[in-house]
Image: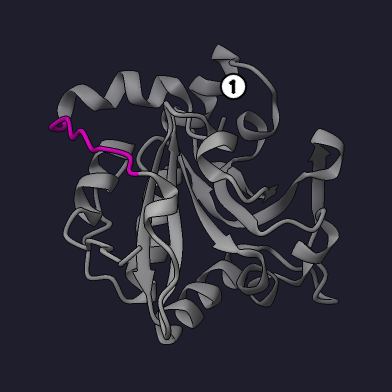
Amino acid sequence: MSCPLLVGALIVAFFPFYSAFAPSVSSYPRKSGQLVIYLVRERWHTGLILPSELAQRCIPEVAQLPSTPWVDFGWGEADFYQTPGFHLRLALKAILRRNESVLRIAAVPSDLQRYYGHNSWIRPLCIDSVTAERLCTFLSHTIFRDSTGSAILTSAHAGGWIRFYKAQGTYWGLQTCNTWVAQALNFAGLRLRWQGIVVAEQLFAAISHYPCHTSP
C-alpha cells in the first residue's frame, strides 16, 4: 500500500467521483511500432507497469529483481509505504507533514489481471518510442543516487520480488502517488494537468482522453 487510505477518506469527497471499466488485459496486444504500458490502481494507490526490457533501460537496478515480463513502479512516503498493513500514525504523518519518499520496484508475472485481482483497475496506455524514452528519463530521475551514482536500497520484501529505493521528491497530502504518476505521464508527453491530482479517481479521469484501442 502506498498512498494512505486515509488520504482518500479525507480528500475524495472534495472531487467528482470517476468510475471506469477495467478491460481485460488480453484485449490490448502490442502493435507494430507501438508499446503498451499499463496504469494500475489498487485501492487508493496507483502505479505504472512497464515491460521489463524497457524498465531495465530506465533503471538498471531492475535487473536485481526476479526475471518477469513486467515491472511495477510506484512512489510513496518512505515510512508508510514500506510498512505492511495500515498504521494510523504513519498515515497521518504522511498526509500532514512533508516527508522523504521511496521508489517501489516490483517484479510482476505475465497475467496482470490475475496478479492484481479483479477488483483492481488496469488501464492500458499506447505510447510510441519517443514517449517511452521520456517516461524512462522521468523514472531515472526519480530514483536518488549518491555521489558514486549508486541507488540506495532501503528495504526488500516478498523474497526480493519487491525492492524499495530512496527517491527524489517530497511526499505529503497534496503530493501523492497519483500526483507522481500524473507528472510522469505529463513529462512523457501526454497533455494532462497534473496539478491538483491527488486521488486515483482524478488520475483515471484525466487519462480517459487517451484511449488505447488496439486490434486483437
Residue 5 appearing in the image: yes
Compared across the picture, whether 103 is left or right of 188 comes to right
Residue depicted at 35% across the width and 57% down the height: 182
On the image, which quarter does residue 144 sit in? bottom right
- Residue 127 in percent (x, y) is at 38, 74
Residue 123 is situated, as x and y percent measured from the top left of the image, at 36, 50
Is residue 8 shown above or below 75? above
Where is 165 relative to 83, above or below? below
Tell me which secondary structure the magenta stretch mostly adopts. loop
- Residue 88 versus residue 96 in the image, above or below: above
The residue to which callout 1 is attached is 90
Q: Is residue 75 above or below residue 77?
A: below
Q: Residue placed at 61% from the left, 29% from the top?
A: 80
Span shown in magenta = 15-23
Mark 1 secondary-structure assignment: helix
Check disc 1 and give the amino acid type: Leu
Which residue lies most toward the front here?
216
Q: Specify whether 112 is left or right of 56.
A: left
Q: For the point 51% across and 71% down, which residue is it?
A: 138
Asked if residue 199 can be seen in this view, the reply is no
Left or right of 97? Residue 60 is right
Quarter occupied by the C terminus:
bottom left
Image quadrant in which you'd find residue 167:
bottom right
Quadrant of residue 7 within the rendered picture: top left
Q: For residue 33: magenta?
A: no
Front residue of 29 and 176: 29
Instruction: Say whether residue 18 is magenta.
Output: yes
Q: Residue at x 67, y 48 (%)?
A: 109
Q: Position of residue 103 (x, y in %)?
A: 63, 52
List x then y, in percent, for residue 193: 21, 60
The residue closer to the viewer here, 37 or 144, is 37
Which of these two is toward me, 203 or 179?
203
